[in-house]
Image: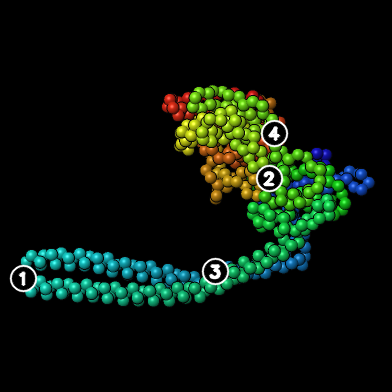
Amino acid sequence: MLAAQELQQHLLTQTDWEHNFGSDDYKQEAAIGKMFGVLVVKDSAGQLGYLSAFSGKVADSNHHPGFVPPLFDMLSEGSFFLEGMEVLNQINEQIKQLSVSPALLESRQVLADTQAEATEQVEGFRTKMKAAKKARKVKREAARITFETADFLVLQEELRQESLQHQFYFKDLVKRWTERTTQAQEQYDHYQSEIDVLKERRKNRSNALQQQLFAQYQFLNQAGETRSLEDIFKHTAVKKPPAGAGECAAPKLLQYAFANNFQPVAMAEFWWGQSPKSEVRKHGNFYPACRGKCEPILGHMLAGMTLDDNPMLSNRNQVTDIPVVYEDEHLLLINKPPEFLSVPGRHVKDSIQLRMKQKYPEATGPMVAHRLDMSTSGLMIIAKSMEVYKFLQRHFMKRTVSKRYEALLDGIVAEDEGTIDLPLRLDIDDRPRQMVCYEHGKAARTHWKVIDRQDGKTRIHFFPITGRTHQLRVHAAHTLGLNTPIIGDDLYGKIGTRLHLHAAAITFKHPVTKEMVSFEVAADF
């Protein structure tokens, strides 16, 4: 904490470089916040000190006084990376120029016009043929009644000849327009093929450059063992290193410590500056290393070291009893304790579902009709049979179950009531965090109402319209939401004794009596 405070003070007062973190002196739309880290270390003489680092680059540079260097400086003058990027930029410029060349644009327009005219001519004559066929049928049926046999045969032959003429003409029409369209397509492909060749060349050069770049990242650990970026990630689900892997503060700090025979003691990373538009990052708040990029790397770099227990591998709340709010022969409602799983996790199996299965061994079906986040407390419906479970699932999907949550926010919300509409998706580089994404996110809407303001805190009711993962937590913390995190939110705010979010009330149709029932349990914070 002392090291982080000293680094933050340095960031406020240093004059060696300038970076737009989002202060009043810069345009907010151009601001780029950054993750910084400190690593407390001990030297061979037992003296304590600390190292500092930043993720990526700051002020368009990888090097600044007082910060450890990157594992590989791709921005150094004459580096293969910059030379490779120059080649890629040249190819990009060629593609750009060819894409707007008059010859290509003209051939594209000729092709489009030819295809349109071909469709118009062919479909127009096809329609004419159908109309003529109907007319011949009418003539034939009328003549069958009024004409003599000889005259009818003559008419029938005339109609057959007309049909053949139409078919021959249509076949010739299709052939002529196919040839014209093919010719226009070949002309367009002639120009487009140049672009396709360049794109393939760009792809191959980009992949080769990426592989060459990955080879420069060799990570040490305490035992002096080295593993490459590719070797580390080939054993993960994604198989290949994500962009920016190895450029975060944590690997930089550990690499410098091991390379200089320092013993790591404690590490912390904090966000400095304006929050990104998609993620929730609060200025000055501490955050764990990202799971997608850093976790595999740190798994190697921290191997063999004595570490704190991983909180993700055990239940944070050693629950002895699950309070029952209501029970009948068909279902029950419980008051889930905070920091306790609803269903078994990857590493931790103890959960509401496991406890209910143990308590009601004769029950059928999954039992847990809906979930609460591990950190959230409050009302959960437990089904005792598959029929009841399916009934409740249908009503949750139809959104006919109404819920009210209560939360205590770490700050004052000025307005009294409103609705937040921010689509959410998983941050694949930092599971289980969610992020706002208008392109790929799922709709997420929350109505809210302030019920009290006191001592710099806001007590609030949330009425979720949708039920996305971490919806209330992100909508509370995000700058486009309430911009005020829930107290104790270790993902989107500041860690505390518990997350102050509670599922306080629920109303639903009873699956057997078909009556609307409501239950409420007050928050204990």
| Left/right of residue 14 with respect to residue 510 in the rendered view | right
Q: Which residue is mark 4?
A: 316
Q: Which residue is mark 2?
A: 274
User: Which class describes the residues within 10 Å of circle 4: few (<14), some (14-19), or many (20+)?
Assistant: some
Camera-side mark, 1 or 4: 4
Q: Amino acid at mark 4?
A: Arg
Residue 446, how many percent across, how many down? 54, 36
Q: Nearer the viewer, residue 88 or 456?
A: 88
Determine which residue is flagged by label 1.
Answer: 148
In this picture, is 177 found above or below 134? below
State the residue at coordinates (25%, 73%): 166
Q: Secondary structure at mark 3?
A: helix
Callout 3 amino acid: Ser
Amino acid tagged 1: Glu
Q: Does label 4 or label 2 sit earlier along the sequence?
A: 2
Q: Element at badge 2?
A: loop
Q: CA distance from mark 1 to mark 2?
A: 95 Å
Q: Quadrant of residue 481?
A: top right
Which badge, 1 or 4, comes first in the chain's sequence? 1
Q: Which residue is mark 3?
A: 99
Estimate the x, y position of residue 443 in percent, counting from the top left.
52, 43
- Residue 230: image location, x then y, percent: 71, 59
Tag nearer the camera, 3 or 1: 1
Residue at position x 39%, y 71% in the image: 114
Which residue sits at x=78%, y=48%?
Answer: 302
> Quick one: label 3 or label 2, which is nearer the N terminus?
3
